[in-house]
Image (cartoon, grey):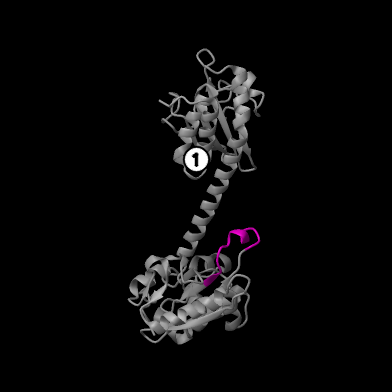
């Protein structure tokens, strides 16, 4: 049971909970329950309807409606025909009620909190005038008072969800890359590191991300890293400068750390609290090349031609391609001649430039006969 408060106390508690639900969806059923009490309704329902799929994205209820498929959740939309605002309360809302007997596929109209080309958000009440302590006129006045807060919170919540989705998609994409990506503050605090960097730090016994700070057990390495990041990030009001630093892998191959200033866009500049640097860490163990399926669909190459083209773009010589794919040198030359014809190029250098414009994946994914080893590089000074 909700504790009965004064009208003003109920209103302020309701508004506080509405805004808390923006970042914590678990607060939404509580906010709806408080709205039900404040408006003298039996239950309150919150729906987000996707216009593109003509289906609900999500929904919530106060948990007091027995017609909901699950207490506190209206994911399939409550089919209660009484879930309509009375005409006296509906005058402050938009939308026309839908007759459930004639069209059961549409959500019932109520207070429109948000309407965009992609979705709309509505709030609906199941009223109970026969037993309510709140008259119809008073309910209308109370809804008019709380409606601006509901609309503002709906916009904030949807924007927050959009940003979270974009961030999740971006990080998932960065985790598929076969090289390292980091965003680092001037003080060496790592704001973001993709999966490749996290694996590299785990395997290298001299690098660490303890407490989110990039450190090296070797003092000379630590100083070099700090100098690289300090120059790239710059300082408030001072533009940084790109730079690089080289590790040597145990087999002698270089592993470059390339740092460049990361400047904010105008939209986020006020929230950009400290200078940042974007650091790319090269992977010297794995050669990344074009996906065989992409080459086949774009140029009509055969599977073997795709492999030859991929290895050529990865920097292998004709003899290396022949050895790795168990082909004669003559056969490799024939494949390259056919590849040049199908791609409309005339020289190997022109072909390689064309291939480097395409998305890259690992040789193993391209279906090579003898892929490069997948071991992560351990770094040496």
Task: Tell me if I can see residue 248 in this picture.
Answer: no
Q: In the rendering, at what x and y percent does residue 176 appear?
A: 46, 64
**Toward the viewer: 96 or 126?**
126
Residue at the image position 43 percent from the left and 27 percent from the top: 2
Locate residue 319, reporting x and y percent.
Answer: 45, 87
Q: Position of residue 260 (x, y in %)?
A: 56, 75
Q: Is residue 284 above or below residue 57?
A: below
Residue to which mark 1 is pinned? 21
Q: Quadrant of the N terminus?
A: top left
In the displayed structure, does residue 111 sit left or right of residue 193?
Answer: right
The span picked out in magenta is 265-278
Q: Where in the figure is residue 251, as x and y percent of width and height?
A: 36, 85
Q: How many marks?
A: 1
Identify which residue is drawn at 58% across, 59% down: 271
Q: Quadrant of the C terminus?
A: bottom left
Q: Quadrant of residue 72?
A: top left
At a point 64% along the width and 58% down the height, the residue shown is: 267
Q: Is residue 113 magenta?
A: no
| The image quarter in which residue 347 lies | bottom right
């Amino acid at each position: 049971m909700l504790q009965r408060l004064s009208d003003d106390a109920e209103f302020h508690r309701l508004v506080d909970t509405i805004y808390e639900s923006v970042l914590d969806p678990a607060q939404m059923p509580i906010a709806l329950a408080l709205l039900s009490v404040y408006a003298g309704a039996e239950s309150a329902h919150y729906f987000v309807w996707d216009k593109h799929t003509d289906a609900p994205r999500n929904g919530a209820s106060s948990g007091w409606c027995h017609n909901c498929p699950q207490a506190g959740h209206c994911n399939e939309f409550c089919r209660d025909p009484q879930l309509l605002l009375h005409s006296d309360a509906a005058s402050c809302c938009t939308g026309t009620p839908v007759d459930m007997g004639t069209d059961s596929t549409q959500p019932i109209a109520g207070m429109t909190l948000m309407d965009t080309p992609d979705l709309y958000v509505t709030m609906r009440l199941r009223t109970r005038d026969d037993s309510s302590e709140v008259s119809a006129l008073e309910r209308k006045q109370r809804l008019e008072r709380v409606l601006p807060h509901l609309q503002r919170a709906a916009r904030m919540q949807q924007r927050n969800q959009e940003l979270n989705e974009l961030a999740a998609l971006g990080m998932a994409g960065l985790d598929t890359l076969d090289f390292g990506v980091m965003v680092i503050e001037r003080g060496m605090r790592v704001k973001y590191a993709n999966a490749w960097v996290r694996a590299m730090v785990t395997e290298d016994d001299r690098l660490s991300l303890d407490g989110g700070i990039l450190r090296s057990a070797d003092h000379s390495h630590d100083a070099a890293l700090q100098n690289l990041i300090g120059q790239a990030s710059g300082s408030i009001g001072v533009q940084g400068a790109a730079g690089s630093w080289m590790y040597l892998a145990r087999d002698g191959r270089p592993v470059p750390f390339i740092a460049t200033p990361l400047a904010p866009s105008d939209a986020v500049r006020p929230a950009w609290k400290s200078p940042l640097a974007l650091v790319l860490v090269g992977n010297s163990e794995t050669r990344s090349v074009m996906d065989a399926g992409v080459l086949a669909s774009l140029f009509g190459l055969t599977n073997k031609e795709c492999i030859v083209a991929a290895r050529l773009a990865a920097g292998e010589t004709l003899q290396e391609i022949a050895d790795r794919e168990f082909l004669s040198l003559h056969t490799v030359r024939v494949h390259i001649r056919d590849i040049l014809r199908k791609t409309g190029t005339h020289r190997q250098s022109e072909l390689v430039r064309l291939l480097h414009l395409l998305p890259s994946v690992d040789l193993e994914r391209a279906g090579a006969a003898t892929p490069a080893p997948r071991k992560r590089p351990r770094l040496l000074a």
